[in-house]
Image (cartoon, rainbow, N blue to C red):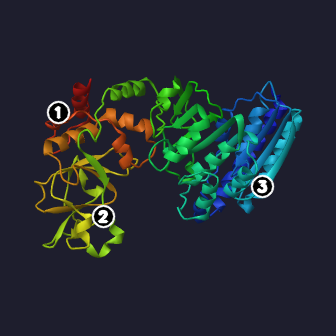
Amino acid sequence: MIDKKNELFSELMLTQINVTRQQVSKATEKEIKSNLGQFFTEPRLALFMSDMFEINEPHINLLDPGAGIGILTTATITQICKKDEKPLSIHVTAVEIDETLLEHLRFSLEFCNKLCSLNNIQFTYSIIHDDFIKYGSTLLKSYTGGMYSKVILNPPYKKISSKSETRLTLREIDIETTNLYSAFVAISKKLLIPNGELVAITPRSFCNGTYFKPFRVDFLSDMNFRKIHLFNSRTDAFKDDEVLQENIIYHAVKEYEHKNVTISSSENLNEEASTHTLEYDKLVHPNDEDKFIRILRDEEDLRVKSLMEGITTSLEDLGLKVSTGKVVDFRTKENLRSAPGYDTVPLIYPVHFHKGSLEWPIFPADKPNAISLNEVTSKQLVPKGNYVLVKRFSPKEETRRIVTAIYNEEQMSAEFVGFENHLNYFHRNGQGLPLDLAKGLAIYLSSSIVDCFFRQFNGHTQVNVGDLKSLPYPPYKLLIKMGTAFDNHLPEQQEIDNIVSDLLE
């Protein structure tokens, strides 16, 4: 057991690092943070993460990519020194691109050295002042096997341009991904030795969608999740930096054996987590080519998943398709109109949604209500018909992820309509749907059952076309029955849920 002297030393040091974190974070301009994708980990969160490691080897080689001021490494060393069975030696490789943080990082690592000395652990470290992607790719080109037994990381969160040098560097080491955070994780897992462990906090967006499919396929080819923790709040993990993102903490091991996964969740760091065990095949379906990661929080999630697995009709079976709105407003500003005119057609934005139907036009409004009909815009429009619209982005104040509205051709007199790019729309080969079918589809998508199922694999604010295609749908006749309950507006939530449950169960 760690003695009182060690415990006090650790607490004082973590307190000092937290003060440094807050000072550096406030002193760093938002533009610099954005460019680097830099958000520091709170010490309590770092301790929670590092406690996931299984410390059972005599010699530890720890990698901290994007080490910052050393919070994650310090927390890891602190947790190791609390163990009854301690390793004989620890070597840390801390990689950091921001030169202004190196002095703070060295200070943290020197603290780790003192703490290890108090616990009779040999401690050494290397600070690598470099871009981790360049550093990691160089290592992977030089070594065929892994190097590190442990990796802990809070990687930067920033999109990677398809034509950037970073993207080309990643392709040279057979990594295809669209964000820095998934690139860091992909390189890290390649640098792990067999049975090596990885603990990370990242956005949850990699769990689904087409953009992250290559990353999921690669990661799951030789890594297996052991523990996953979710925060129910989008903002708590990095509240000091005002980050609105649903984060996930996960512990994965580089081995091929599938084992049960421990799933935990809490509102924030202050609340006790609820925990349960999930069979691995329920987390990642063996026959799922997309390798969606479906995180079931509790028994209710299991019930919903079981119910949804009984629904076997696909969108294709229904003869339906879903697409993203074609009107990108900033590319056609000269054709936008605030009010309808003789030469315009309706232009629909999320702002026009109202209780499952549309309130159009809106005056005054921040968005245009119409678009000019001409040779240029005609390619961006769809013909008159009934369509089910879905917001592509769900604001935090929305109770459901999938927010729908019906575009009813009887409401509009125009022969064409424009759907703005922040909308998805259901159609039949580019044409509208029977009204009862559209209404039934809107009710089904608005149900709590679908919302719960959708959240099991979608952990961000965006509702992609691929996500909507992946959902199971009731047969045509059941959707028509559901549609009879939709009058001019969607029913109340409880009524929607009763309708869908009665027809599906």
Given residues 167 and 499, the one toward you in this image is: 167
Determine the secondary structure under disc 1.
Answer: helix
Residue shown at the point (77%, 33%) measured from the top left: 80
Residue shown at the point (53%, 41%) measured from the top left: 217
| Amino acid residing under circle 1 | Lys
Determine the secondary structure under disc 2.
Answer: loop
The circle drawn on residue 128 is 3
Label located before the other in sequence (3 or 2) = 3
Label located before the other in sequence (3 or 1) = 3
Label pair 3/1, CB-CB below 8 angstroms: no
State the image coordinates of residue 212 (x, y, percent, origin top left). Answer: 50, 47
Farthest bottom residue in view: 334
State the image coordinates of residue 275 (x, y, percent, origin top left). Answer: 54, 25
Classify 382 as above or below 272. below
State the image coordinates of residue 199 (x, y, percent, origin top left). Answer: 65, 38
Q: Is residue 283 left or right of residue 219?
A: left
Given residues 217 and 208, the one toward you in this image is: 217
Q: Is residue 472 left or right of residue 25?
A: left
Label 1 and label 2: CA atoms lie apart by: 33 Å
**Closer to the observer: label 3 or label 1?**
1
Residue 174 visible? The answer is yes
Label 3 and label 1: CA atoms lie apart by: 63 Å
Badge 1: residue crowd in 10 Å (few <14, some 14–19, many ≥20): few
Badge 3: residue crowd in 10 Å (few <14, some 14–19, many ≥20): some
Residue shown at the point (19%, 36%) measured from the top left: 476
Residue for badge 2:
327
Residue for badge 1:
477
Given residues 374 and 85, the one toward you in this image is: 374
